[in-house]
Amino acid sequence: LTKGFRAARNRLAGLTELNEENLEPALRDVRLSLLEADVEFGVVKRFLGRVKESVIGETITNEVEAKGKKIKIGPAERFIKACQDELVGMMKSEGPALVHAKAPQPTGIMMVGLQGSGKTTTSGKLARLLESQGKKPLLVAADVQRPGAIEQLKVLGERLSIPVFSIPGGRPVDICTKAIDHARKLKRDVIIYDTAGRLAVDEPLMVELQQIKTNTKADNVFMVVDAMIGQDAVKTAAAFHERLGLTGVVMTKLDGDARGGAALSIREVTGAPVKFVGMGEGLDKLEEFRPEGMASRILGFGDVVGLMKDFEGVVDQNKAEQDAKRMLEGRFTLHDFLEQIRMLQKMGPLQDLFEKLPFFADSVPEGFQVDEKELKRAEAIVSSMTKRERIEPELFTKDKGRIQRVAKGSGRSDKDVVDLLQRFSFMKQMMGDIGQQAGLLQRLPGMK
Ligand code: GDP
Ligand code: MG
């Protein structure tokens, strides 16, 4: 998946100057990578044009000073950074994720989009998120088309203990209009309208949605887009935007394989920025959009900032930054490894973690992905090592007796210990590769 981008980096490695000629093959590789990520053709062309312009003719600094540290920056890093910066610039949105109405007027959020894109689920997720921020949301079941749609929202509402307004047999426009009075009565300050979708854009639906927008004066009109739809999403979004004036886009199902290039295309073509992303079916799986993370994902080198955020959830921020830096510099010890294992356990499902690192998906050999039980075993093994052994794992290669001692101490076999050491060494090397590869170190907080 990320081959195109890595190839581009390799082509540029070792050069001392970027010019029209030596840049061409690298640009071709990135072009391929972006098209694979579902970025629209015209957008790719414009993007590459801008990247080219920004790197040609620049003198390449080989070393820069950051916080007292010297960092090497070669042409490959310059190029990758230019790609990342350009993508971030193209996807960045001014203004907050949500426009709030002036109190006492409740804030209106209209969810629109094709059937199955995730409107109802996202309505629930957003209600949950807003409630965690101290808001009092009301969910409105305005999809009277799909059998079971009202029930689906009610079930979500019950799970979240958030009220759901519906009028069985009512017209969507009336339901939404009446919901405003209802919200006032219940003292709810945000109204989320879960509207109907279709398999394709059609006229009666557009008219219905326009009427809802006009009557509710919704402050936010969010189009929910399934990341897996890829290229088609752009045309659909353009059609919705033309009729409804979208204020934002929510891209769902980014927990799957899709690289999310449509986020870039939609932004470029319609001007509507992505505001939130759906990262799973669970109601807690909605995140505010971060252009940096999406740029990395589209380019194919893992969402390091997202990973950092997870670290921050369980350890203090300074430590998280140090850990990430050390990991990426390929300087981490078995002691760190043990800490990481403990942290991984606190961070919840490993699945989520690895999904943030698409890079892993291609380069990790079969069997690398440890399961929770394996983590426990690894923890036992590392715990049986001395402090010195954790810092200098080479000691094990010189002295087989150490392996036997650790095996005994942890109740595992010698082979288990050897396997763990191998895996550690692989992980260490890989972390170093990622760090160098993407020039990621420079982008970690505190390294700018
Ligand atoms: P709607 O027709 O637009 O209202 O779509 P739904 O909210 O009913 O969602 C359709 C399907 O997509 C459901 O099975 C959801 O669980 C699933 N879904 C929604 N958002 C996500 C997401 O971010 N990730 C994953 N994996 N599934 C999602
Ligand atoms: Mg629905």
Image: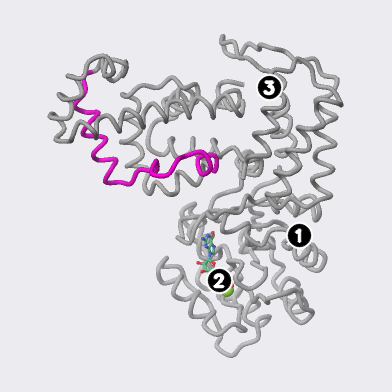
Instruction: Report the amino acid beneath label 1.
Output: Val
Q: Which amino acid type is marked by label 3?
A: Ala
The residue to which callout 3 is attached is 13
Residue under numbered circle 2: 183
Q: Residues within 10 Å of mark 2 (few under 14, many from 20)?
A: many
Where does the magenta region start and end? 358-386
Residue at 69% in and 28% down = 81
Distance CA(mark 1)–CA(mark 3): 35 Å
2 vs 1, front mark: 1
Mark 3 or 2, nearer chain start: 3
Residue 225 appears left or right of 187: right
Q: Is residue 32 magenta?
A: no
Mark 1 is surrounded, within 10 Å at the Cα level, by few (under 14), some (14 to 19) or many (20 or more) other residues, namely: many
Toward the viewer: 201 or 204? 201
Q: Is residue 403 left or right of residue 145?
A: left
Q: CA distance from mark 3 to mark 2?
A: 60 Å
Q: Quarter holding the C terminus? A: top right
Give whichever of 34, 112 is nearer the camera.
34
Q: Main secondary structure of the magenta part?
A: helix
